Image (spheres, rainbow, N blue to C red):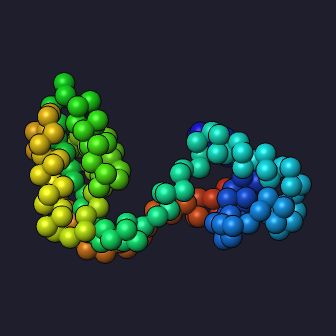
Amino acid sequence: MNTSQLDRLDARILLALDAEPDASALALSRSLGVARNTVHARLARLEASGALGSFTRRLRGSALGYTLTALVSISVMQTQSHLVESGLFTIPEVVEVHATTGDADLVAKVLARDTTDFHRINTEILRLEGIQRTSTVISVLEVMPTRMEGLLERLARQDR
C-alpha cells in the first residue's frame, strides 16, 4: 500500500488505535464520530493491503532479553546477493535488513543478548556465502524509536 491510498480518516483511525490499542470498532466509531461499519471496513482494508505490519513489530527486543542492538553494513558479491539475503533470513537475531546505496549493499539490524552473543551472531553472518565484508556499529542508546505519529497527524489534519 502506498501513502496515497491512506486518507484522513485512515490516519485518524490509526492514531486512535495508537492511543488505545484495545479499542473495539464500536469504541473507535464513537470517539471518531463515524459509523462502526466504516471503521471495521477501513481496518480490514488496511490489514489486507499490508499497510499494517504484524503485531510482533511492536515488541521490543529487550522484552526478550536482547539488550544489544547492532547495525551491520554488509558488502556482497553481486552475483550472490540472493544467497546472502536468504541466509540472513535464517538468523532469528537479524530482525531487519535494508538494501542500501553507498559503500554497503545491505544494512542489517541485529539484536543480541550481549557482546559475546553478538560475536556468535556476527560469526554466523560472516559464514554466509557471498559476503565480501561487514562493518558494525553498536547502538548505545535508542534516541528515537521508529515513529509514524507525526506523519499520521499531518495526514489527519489535511483537507481533502
Residue shown at the point (69%, 67%) measured from the top left: 22
The answer to whether 148 appears left or right of 115 in the picture is right
Residue shown at the point (84%, 61%) measured from the top left: 26
For residue 7, say whether it is visible: no
For residue 65, say whether it is visible: yes
User: With respect to residue 90, does 120 lie above or below?
Assistant: below
* Rendering coords of residue 98 (x, y %): 33, 45
Task: Point out the image quarter for the N terminus.
Answer: top right
Q: Quadrant of residue 79?
A: top left
The answer to whether 74 appears left or right of 61 in the picture is left
Q: Quadrant of residue 71?
A: bottom left
Residue shown at the point (71%, 42%) measured from the top left: 45
* Rendering coords of residue 142 (x, y %): 35, 72
* Rendering coords of residue 73 (x, y %): 21, 50
Q: How many marks?
A: 0
* Rendering coords of residue 108 (x, y %): 28, 50
User: With respect to residue 27, does 107 lie above or below?
Assistant: above
Residue shown at the point (15%, 39%) measured from the top left: 128
